[in-house]
């Protein structure tokens, strides 16, 4: 926290603060498939904590539903299956809402 306060106050810092915002990287870094970010909260959390510790990052754990609400509102998504896929993919957009 002191490092962030110094940086925001334009005072010298010993190093640039690091914030890891990639769920996929944390999981792959710990040897898990990326899909664990979306179907296994405990594994996702532990991978994020351990990766933050390894890289000296600001300790923040993130959780997302995947595809930014598309799945929750009836869209069709595909969970990541390959090592290069870092998030769910939207397969079919949401259907327009019918007006009554």
Image: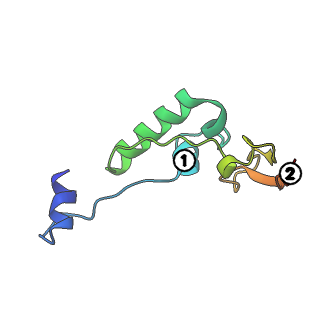
Near-viewer residue (100 or 41): 100
Residue 78, image x, y percentages = 80, 46
The first of marks 1 and 2 along the sequence is: 1
Residue 32 in sight: no
Residue 47, image x, y percentages = 49, 37
Element class at badge 1: helix
Residue carrying label 1? 23
Q: Given the current orientation, which residue lies at the most extreme front position?
A: 100
Residue 44 in sight: yes
Near-viewer residue (3 or 90): 90
Q: Is residue 61 above or below residue 2?
A: above
Residue carrying label 2? 99
Give the CA separation, mark 1 to mark 2.
Answer: 38 Å
Q: Callout 1: few (<14), some (14-19), or many (20+) C-alpha neighbours within 10 Å?
A: many
Q: Which mark is residue 46?
A: none
Place residue 36 in its image quadrant: top right
Q: Is residue 70 above or below residue 50?
A: below
């Amino acid at each position: 926290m002191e490092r962030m306060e110094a940086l925001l106050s334009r005072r010298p810092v010993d190093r640039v603060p690091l914030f890891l915002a990639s769920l996929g990287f944390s999981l792959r870094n710990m040897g898990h498939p990326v899909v664990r970010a979306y179907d296994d909260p405990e594994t996702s959390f532990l991978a994020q904590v351990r990766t933050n510790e390894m890289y000296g990052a600001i300790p923040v754990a993130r959780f997302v539903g995947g595809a930014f609400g598309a799945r929750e509102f009836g869209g069709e998504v595909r969970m990541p299956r390959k090592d290069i896929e870092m998030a769910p993919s939207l397969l079919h957009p949401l259907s327009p809402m019918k007006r009554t």
